[in-house]
Image (tube, helix red, strand yellow):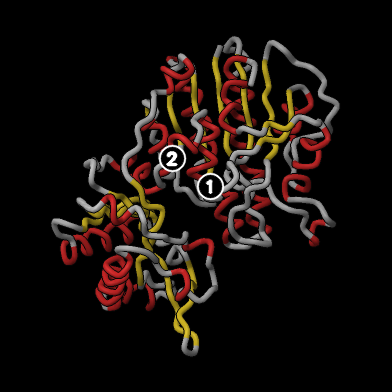
Amino acid sequence: MKYLVLIGDGMADYPVKALGGKTPLMAARTPNMDALAKEGEIGLVHTIPQGLPKGSEIANLSIFGYDPRQYYTGRGPLEAASMGVELGPEDVAFRLNLVTLEAVGGSVIMEDYSAGHISTEEGGAIIRDLDKDLGNSVFRFYPGVSYRHLLVWRGQVEKVEKIKTTPPHDITEQEIGEYLPKGEGAQELIKLMTDTQIFLHEHPINRTRLEEGKRAANATWPWGQGKAPHMPSFAERFGLNGGVISAVDLIKGIGISAGLRVITVPGATGYLDTNYQGKAEYALQVLEQEDFVYLHVEAPDEASHNGDLEAKMAAIEAFDEKVVGTIVKGMEDRGDYRIMVLPDHPTPLALRTHADDPVPFVIYDSNQKRPSGTRGFDEKEASRSGIVIEEGHTLMERLVRGKA
């Protein structure tokens, strides 16, 4: 038996007036997900336990089969694992965004959490320069993908873990003052943010971007900090070996922490222009030798953070056609398999950030096709089924062992 998990990050949403009260999943053309729902098990799952951050790190840990209440230590250390950055027992890793801040009157607002979706080449060069100029035995900067990077604070785990930080995508177009780091150690972190802002003001890449009419990466924003997690391997949990396919360091980091192999796909960007087809084709290649693949597409989430309905619809339809459709067709002559498709969390266009509402899921078993009575794959149809999984980390059990 082969097992596939296909994640359309942030696909779930609330009803949209411009769509006649339908959600994007309800309105988009998704024949492949609809077909799976009609012959599989469809329902709702709570991927974010009450009281935990409404983030992809929590939701994807749940979907991987790890209870976030037990294994979550922070987003930063998961991204560190993906980037090959080793953390000592007293080290804390932060996710570090390159962002665009704008002065409006007497306030400073978060204009763009991604610095105009700066390219990996530009972002990496900026972070490497930051590390040369401001890096030391306490603070180190590590380049990642696009606007997503890493800050490591060495040797201060007890102090740093008490700092409260805020994801920048949660405060788009809001004044940043009340969302700056708080708690013991926060002033040191704020000073570092100020120092990076001064450094970035005259950086040649930013001057060039402004000349080209693009947004400057004029500040850094650390968040999601934590120490290195300790998790049992996926093979120990479920008896399966396989790979993880994603352009996002967070997802790759969870996979690495679980002992899975990271599969690099050319053209996978973590944005709307990602290589959907390539991800599906590489997933099929993984299953020639191994039994499990976790395939993640970030594009619908990015569209939601931007408040772009048209882009979100396009991303959902591309996910259905080029990922789900390619996988289903490619698995036809490969023996027994099970596919699970779901968003990790809702990212409602109206909020432009994550929510913790339950999300629709479908599990399709090539050996147990059964009419579900549903008309397709969306939030409303999933709700109609009456199936609700309260503990998201048990969903993987349902996929692998046929029970929760």
Coordinates of residue 232 in the picture (x, y in percent): 39, 24
Left or right side of 278 for 304: right
Q: Looking at the image, tell me whether mark 2 or mark 1 is earlier in sequence order.
A: 1
Q: Determine whether label 2 and label 1 are within 8 Å by CB.
A: yes
Task: Compute the Cα span from label 2 to label 1.
Answer: 10 Å
Could you tell me the amino acid type at mark 1?
Leu
- Quadrant containing the N terminus is top right
The residue sitting at 35% across, 70% down in the picture is 219
Instruction: Please report the residue visible at 18 percent of the width from the left and 57 percent of the height from the top.
Output: 138
Tag 1 secondary structure? loop
Query: Does 99 appear above or below 68?
Result: below
Q: Secondary structure at mark 2?
A: loop
Corner quadrant of residue 396: top right
Q: Which mark is residue 72?
A: 2
Q: Position of residue 243 (x, y in %)?
A: 43, 26
Q: Amino acid at mark 2?
A: Tyr
Q: Is residue 25 above or below residue 118?
A: above
Could you say which quadrant of the image residue 206 lies in?
bottom left
State whether residue 204 appears in this view. no
Residue visible at 81% across and 31% down in the picture: 385
Q: Is residue 349 left or right of residue 279?
A: right
Instruction: Find residue 366 and name its label.
Output: none
Taking the image as shown, residue 16 lies to the left or right of residue 276, namely right
The residue identified by callout 1 is: 52
Whole-percent x, y for residue 62 in the image: 54, 34
Q: Position of residue 401 (x, y in %)?
A: 59, 14
